[in-house]
C-alpha cells in the first residue's frame, strides 16, 4: 500500500515525472479520440502485432524529451531502431504504449513503461497509467513512489498490511486461455483459496504494488520493454520476477529482445507459493 508523503528531492525523478505526465496526456487524448470513433490509424508490424498512431506519437515525444534530458544515454524503444543496442552498457528502455491490444479493445489498462538499464540490470523504473493519471516510480534500492499528476500528490510505498487474508490473488491477462494457467491455479488451490484478477499488460505490475495481485504467471512470450520497469519496481519492494527456470531476467544482453515466460511475485511469501506451484505443474 501507499501512504501520503512529501515530494522526493531526487533530480532524475523530478525531471522525468512532468515529461511522463505530458506523455500520458498525449496518450489519453489519443485514446479518447479513438473511443469517440474519430479517424485513427492502426497498422500491423512484421510480427503481426498492432501498432497505432498513439504508439508512434508518444514514442516521438519521449525520444525527443529523453534526448534533451540525458543526451548521453541512448533509448531502446519498441518503436525505434535499436540495432546498435549491444554497444550500450547503459540505456533507457521504453514502451510508449504497453497494452496496445487493451487500447484497441477500449480497456483502460494500458501504460507507458520506462526503465534505466545499467550493465543488464534495471536500476530505475517508471510506469505511468494515463487513464488513472498516476505513475509509479523509483530506484531498485529504494521503496517506490506513487505520483498523482492530476492532483500533484505524492505517496510512498509501505510494507504495512492493513488486512491479512489466506486467499492468493493471481493476476491473469484477459487472453489467458492456455490450460497451463488453470493447472497452475489448481495447484495453488490445494492449500490456499485463489482470487483471479484479470487485467492488461504491465498494469498488473501496478496492481501488485497496490496489493491487488500476489502472483502473476505468464506462460507465453513477452519483450524486454514489457517487463523491465515492472521487475525493477517489484524487486524494490522485496518481490521479483523470475524466468520459468527461476532466474531473474537480465536486459539488453541476449541476441533477441524476446523473453520467455515468467513468474512475478509481490513478496517472499508469495514467491514460495509461486515457485512451488511452478515446480509441480507440467509446462
Image: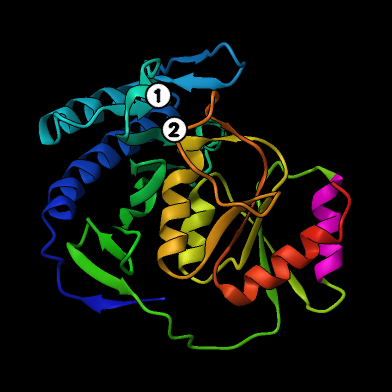
**Residue 77 in which image quadrant:** top left
Instruction: Establish if 221 lies above or below 218.
Output: above
Residue name at image x 24 percent, y 26 percent:
63
Residue 165: % across, % down: 65, 85
Start and end of the magenta stretch?
179-188
Question: Magenta region, mostly helix, strand or loop?
Answer: helix
Sequence-wise, the earlier of marks 1 and 2 is 1
124 in magenta: no
Report if residue 182 lies within the magenta region.
yes
User: Is the N terminus in the top left, top right, bottom left or bottom right quadrant?
Assistant: bottom left
* Residue denoted by label 1: 86
The residue drawn where x is 65% and y is 47% is 173
**Secondary element at image label 2:** loop
Q: Position of residue 113 (x, y in %)?
A: 38, 42
- The residue labelled by disc 2 is 252
- Specify few, some or many for label 2: CA neighbours under 10 Å numbering under 14, 14-19, or 20 or more: many
Q: Is residue 263 left or right of residue 277?
A: left
Amino acid at each position: 500500500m501507499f501512504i501520503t508523503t512529501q515530494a522526493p528531492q531526487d533530480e532524475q525523478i523530478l525531471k522525468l515525472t512532468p515529461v511522463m505526465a505530458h506523455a500520458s496526456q498525449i496518450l489519453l487524448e489519443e485514446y479518447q479520440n479513438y473511443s469517440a470513433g474519430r479517424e485513427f490509424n492502426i497498422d500491423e508490424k512484421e510480427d503481426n502485432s498492432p501498432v497505432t498512431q498513439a504508439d508512434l506519437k508518444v514514442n516521438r515525444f519521449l525520444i525527443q524529451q529523453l534526448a534533451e534530458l540525458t543526451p548521453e544515454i541512448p533509448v531502446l524503444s519498441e518503436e525505434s531502431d535499436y540495432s546498435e543496442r549491444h554497444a550500450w552498457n547503459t540505456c533507457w528502455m521504453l514502451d510508449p504504449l504497453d497494452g496496445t491490444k487493451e487500447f484497441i479493445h477500449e480497456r483502460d489498462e494500458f501504460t507507458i513503461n520506462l526503465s534505466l538499464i545499467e550493465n543488464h540490470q534495471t536500476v530505475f523504473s517508471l510506469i505511468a497509467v494515463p487513464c488513472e493519471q498516476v505513475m509509479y516510480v523509483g530506484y531498485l534500492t529504494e521503496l517506490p513512489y506513487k505520483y498523482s499528476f492530476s492532483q500533484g500528490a505524492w505517496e510512498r510505498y509501505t510494507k504495512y498490511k492493513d488486512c491479512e487474508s489466506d486467499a492468493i490473488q493471481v493476476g491473469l491477462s484477459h487472453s489467458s486461455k492456455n490450460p497451463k494457467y488453470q493447472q497452475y491455479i489448481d495447484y495453488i488451490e490445494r492449500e490456499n483459496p485463489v482470487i483471479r484478477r484479470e487485467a492488461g499488460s504491465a498494469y498488473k505490475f501496478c496492481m501488485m504494488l497496490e496489493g491487488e495481485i500476489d502472483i502473476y504467471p505468464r506462460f507465453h512470450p513477452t519483450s524486454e520493454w514489457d517487463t523491465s520497469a515492472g521487475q525493477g519496481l517489484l524487486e524494490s519492494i522485496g518481490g521479483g520476477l523470475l524466468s520459468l527456470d527461476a532466474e531473474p531476467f537480465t536486459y539488453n544482453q541476449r541476441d533477441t529482445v524476446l523473453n520467455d515466460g515468467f513468474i512475478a511475485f509481490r513478496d517472499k511469501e508469495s514467491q514460495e507459493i509461486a515457485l512451488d506451484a511452478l515446480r509441480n505443474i507440467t509446462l
